[in-house]
Amino acid sequence: MEKLATNIEMLFERTQDYTNSSIELFKLNAIDKIADITASITFRLVFGLIVAMFSLFINIGISLYIGKLIGENYLGFLIVSGFYLVIAILLFIFRDRFIKIPIMNLVIKKLLESKN
């Protein structure tokens, strides 16, 4: 009878060790996925900021050039601003297709991606 009790205790200890190891592995995998997603989103934000700065200065140049062609600098800025207003309206209309769905797909892809 003591042997049976000892075997049950050993089985219980091994089950407990396995459960603890599984929980720890799950935590580490979750941390890895979160770090991967955070790094990916951070890179995209930094890259977007650099592109935005580049775009800002190009747009100032284009506005000044259009203003010079028309004869009034402020008209060049108004034309370029109107162009961006149209783009903003289109992005708002198609926000699911161009913003929400790609971000969701990125997160899902990163969560399901396995490291080999």
Image (spheres, rainbow, N blue to C red):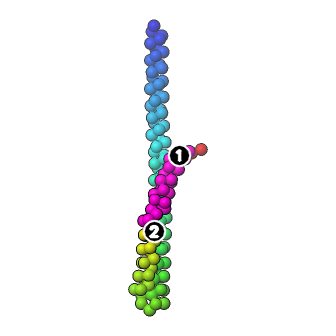
Q: Is residue 9 visible?
A: yes
- All told, the count of numbered labels is 2
Amino acid on which disc 1 is placed:
Leu
Between 7 and 102, the one nearer to me in the picture:
102
For disc 2, the marked residue is 90
Ranked by sequence position, the earlier of labels 1 and 2 is 2
Q: Which residue is rendered at x = 48% and y = 33% of the image?
A: 22
Query: Helix, strand, or loop for circle 2?
Result: helix
Query: Helix, strand, or loop for circle 1?
Result: helix
Determine the main secondary structure of the stretch shown in magenta.
helix
Crowding at mark 1 (Cα within 10 Å: few <14, some 14-19, many 20+)? few
Crowding at mark 2 (Cα within 10 Å: few <14, some 14-19, many 20+)? few
Amino acid on which disc 2 is placed:
Leu
Q: CA distance from mark 1 to mark 2?
A: 32 Å
Relative to 11, say whether 112 is above or below.
below
Residue 20 screen position, x and y as percent: 44, 31
Q: Quadrant of the C terminus?
A: top right
* Magenta-highlighted residues: 91-114
Q: Which residue is rendered at x = 45% and y = 62% of the image?
A: 95
Residue 112, which numbered label?
1
Q: Is residue 42 visible?
A: no
Residue 54 screen position, x and y as percent: 48, 73
Q: Is residue 93 magenta?
A: yes
Residue 2, which numbered label?
none
Q: Which residue is rendered at x = 44% and y = 73% of the image?
A: 86
